[in-house]
Amino acid sequence: MINMPGEILKVEKLCFKYNDADVLKDINFTLEVGDFVGILGPNGCGKTTLLKNINRWLQPHQGNIHIDGSNILKISVKDLAKQVATVPQDTYLDIAFTAEQIVAMGRNPHLKNFESEQSKDRAIIEDSMKVMDILHLKDKPAYQLSGGERQRVLIARALAQQPRLLLLDEPTSHLDINYQWELLELLKKLCVEKSLTILIVIHDINLASMFCNKVILLKEHRIFKMGNLTEVLNEQNIREVFCMDVQVTFPKDSLRPVAIFLSPTDKNVLPKPFKSLHVICGGGEGEKLLYYLSQRGYKVSVGVLNKGDTDWKVAHLLGFTVIEEVPFSPITEEKILENISHINRSDAVILANIPFGLGNLKNLACLKQLVARKRVFILEEKDIGERDYTNGKATQMYNEIKERATVLKSMQELKKII
Ligand SMILES: Nc1ncnc2c1ncn2[C@@H]1O[C@H](COP(=O)(O)OP(=O)(O)OP(=O)(O)O)[C@@H](O)[C@H]1O
């Protein structure tokens, strides 16, 4: 078998059955070094089974799988484990071990029989734990870890294995949006900087679009489409595979499709009173609101947000326009002017139920300037007094804005209008 330069994985005519049921039919694809490829498809279409064939937990009924030119059935399990690591869907961990001991197991393929870890191995284990932000959990027994913590331990174990190909089966399922983003960003970095190749089962189309360079769309146990994002993630393919109506848009200057799922209610019944909205949010308080506006198909701008903020991540994920400031910095005049220009262009503004500190007070000042000539909605789930960390400056401005705005006390109330 001659492998092409840069090719790390070749799957040829792969077929797999459980008993007599076909689960994978005629699967053919290749991965290049540094690829970050998402596998998407409905439940039960064979995504996990495909990964289990590649890491040899299962054996194909027909076809071949080559890693770096070698047939995986012809190399030892240990040698395969030096090349391929897996983060399984199931986060079960042996309760007898601590988090650190589990991560250390990632070094086993690199050790001789009965050899103990050397200082180089210890450094790799520590580094993997640091990267996954679990150093503080190192002495915790597995049974005391939360679902998300267990998932991060398993990823750290796979990183400690230092594989060339990393298989991940829904690794973000237990993680909150921040950890999801950080994990995928880290994996992307490893692809670019360390030539790691990643094959990841992922259900969130927009997360896949944000981080993968290619996707494989499975339907009824076959590859329905494989290719770059724009080739695969279009409205027709998503409709055919998931039986869901979506609207696919492209955020400004981006070739990454963003899918907005349209429920029958969103499509027909509730008319949208506005076309475009500007949202002032931050710190994760805008997350539910942003997802809702996306589902309803609004054109949304958001700002000013510091890069890395939870709402910044969600807004990017949803393909919204974001007016952004460097992390942990006060908002500059330049960004305020940009924000004002977006507010002026939008049909209405929504002020989310956010806390105010000196860092984001300028967002409020900017809204105060515009409230006389703009339709403003305030989502007020908590009294301003409870979220004012500015010695009353925010409360004063907020109350002035409130006099001219429509106040909505909950998301339910907001949904009746917007
Ligand atoms: N051990 C098994 N024995 C028999 N059938 C199995 C076994 N494991 C999985 N299957 C079946 O094989 C099919 C594919 O399962 P697989 O787990 O690969 O799907 P998937 O696409 O990863 O699904 P999901 O999105 O729900 O995780 C399903 O119909 C499943 O019921």
Image: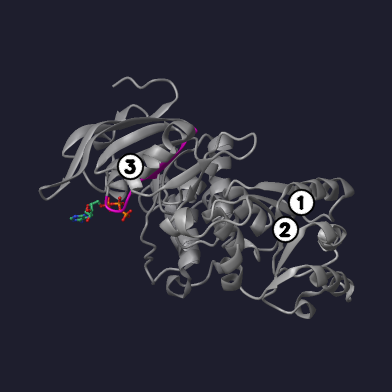
Amino acid identity at mark 3: Glu
Q: Residue furthest left?
A: 20
Q: Which residue is mark 3?
A: 240
* Label 2 residue SS: strand
Q: In percent of the image, x 79 and y 71: which residue is there? A: 402
Q: Residues within 10 Å of mark 2 (few under 14, many from 20)?
A: many
Closer to the camera in the image, 124 or 376: 376
Question: Looking at the picture, does residue 338 appear above or below residue 372?
Answer: above
Real-space CA distance between mark 2 and mark 1, rounded to the nearest whole angstrom = 7 Å
Real-space CA distance between mark 3 and mark 2, rounded to the nearest whole angstrom = 36 Å
Q: In percent of the image, x 53 and y 45: which residue is there? A: 187
Of mark 2 and mark 1, the one earlier in the sequence is 1
Question: Looking at the picture, does residue 141 appear above or below residue 208?
Answer: below
Q: Is residue 258 left or right of residue 5?
A: right
Q: Which residue is mark 2?
A: 349
Q: Quadrant location of the C terminus?
A: bottom right
> Magenta segment, which residues?
34-44
* Label 1 residue SS: helix
Assess mark 1: CB under 8 A from ligand 1? no
Assess mark 2: CB under 8 A from ligand 1? no
Q: Are marks 3 and 2 in contact (CB under 8 Å)?
A: no
- The percent position of residue 260, horizontal first and vertical second, equals 50, 49
Of mark 3 and mark 1, the one earlier in the sequence is 3
> Residue 343 got which mark?
1
Q: Residues within 10 Å of mark 1 (few under 14, many from 20)?
A: many
What is the tally of numbered marks visible in this picture? 3
Q: In percent of the image, x 56 and y 72: which residue is there? A: 412
Q: Are marks 2 and 1 in contact (CB under 8 Å)?
A: yes
Q: Quadrant location of the N terminus?
A: top left
- The percent position of residue 357, horizontal first and vertical second, equals 82, 67
* Label 3 residue SS: helix
Of mark 3 and mark 2, the one earlier in the sequence is 3
